[in-house]
Image (spheres, rainbow, N blue to C red):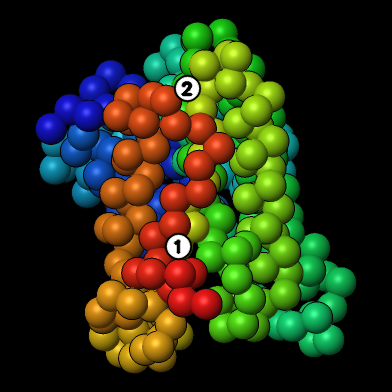
Amino acid sequence: MSRLEGKVAIITGAASGMGLAGAKLFANEGAKVVATDVVGDVLDERVKEIVANGGEAIAYHLDVSQPDSWNEVVEKTVEKYGKIDILVNNAGIHMAKGILEAELDDWNKVMAINSTGVWLGMKTVIPHMQQNGGGSIVNTSSIAAIVGGVADAGGAAYSASKGAVRALTKHAAQWFGTDNIRVNSVHPGAIFTGMVEKAGIHSQEEMGSNYDGKAALKPYAGEAQDIANAYLYLASDESKYVTGLELVVDGGWTTNS
């Protein structure tokens, strides 16, 4: 497969879950993958697996909330590959604290990673995409940016941070379209990942049982590969006339009014 042949892609939060699924898929589709995360040892192992399976990938430590960390990763990427075609801002955290329960430090931590990290990524990468004649940026938001209730799993800062990503994506799509830079957002619903499994839910079906009556498609929860497929479409030239899009991958949750 070669839907990303010759393209250089930076993916954040690539040590596990949706980011790892995206890194594997992009490598299978011919991309040179720069996989980044704060969990260096795990990331290194996952990247070794990608390379062993015939993909081209490299692991870099990245704290998305720190501009110096972004500058280092982008400089290394350009030095190694000469360009950046794709940025997938996937890294994120969740904290199940509502407006009354959250403390300021909780709020700031979630916002720093989930929304400030997206801004910093675009701020650092876009100048290189401008020099290169274009590119594709995929920002991971959430259905929590669209609907309330259990969609945000009780996380007020999470909901606000993903709403910021939704709005920032549209801002960037308008301001950088003339540079041939496309900026789109993906909005996952309930997705079964390793993080969910660590929380004590052991299967996609078990997770989905909590959302019967929300999502329309069984088993009422998706998997990381569903999001990776969305990333791939928006990163590839198949979406060359698509920008500012909210690609919702939620089994129909947000259509349930």
Residue located 39% across and 24% down the image: 240
Locate residue 12 relative to residue 155 in the image: left or right: left
Q: Position of residue 125 (x, y in %)?
A: 59, 26
Which secondary structure, mark 2? strand
Locate residue 99 relative to residue 37 in the image: left or right: right
Q: Which residue is mark 2?
A: 135
Residue located 46% across and 76% down the image: 256
Residue located 39% across and 60% down the image: 249
In which quarter of the view is residue 213 placed? bottom left
In the foreground, 63 or 149: 149
Instruction: Check if mark 1's residue and mark 2's residue have beta carbons within 8 Å.
Output: no
- The N terminus, quarter of image: top left
Q: Position of residue 214 (x, y in %)?
A: 43, 82
Q: Position of residue 96 (x, y in %)?
A: 64, 82
Residue located 36% across and 55% down the image: 227
Question: Which labelled disc corresponds to residue 188?
Answer: 1
In which quarter of the view is residue 191 placed? bottom left
Amino acid type at mark 2: Gly
Label 1 crowd bin: few (<14), some (14–19), many (20+), radius 10 Å: many
In the foreground, 114 or 198: 114
Give the alpha-carbon distance from disc 1 to disc 2, as whole Å: 23 Å
**Residue 251 is at least partly visible in this image:** yes
**Residue 128 is at least partly visible in this image:** no
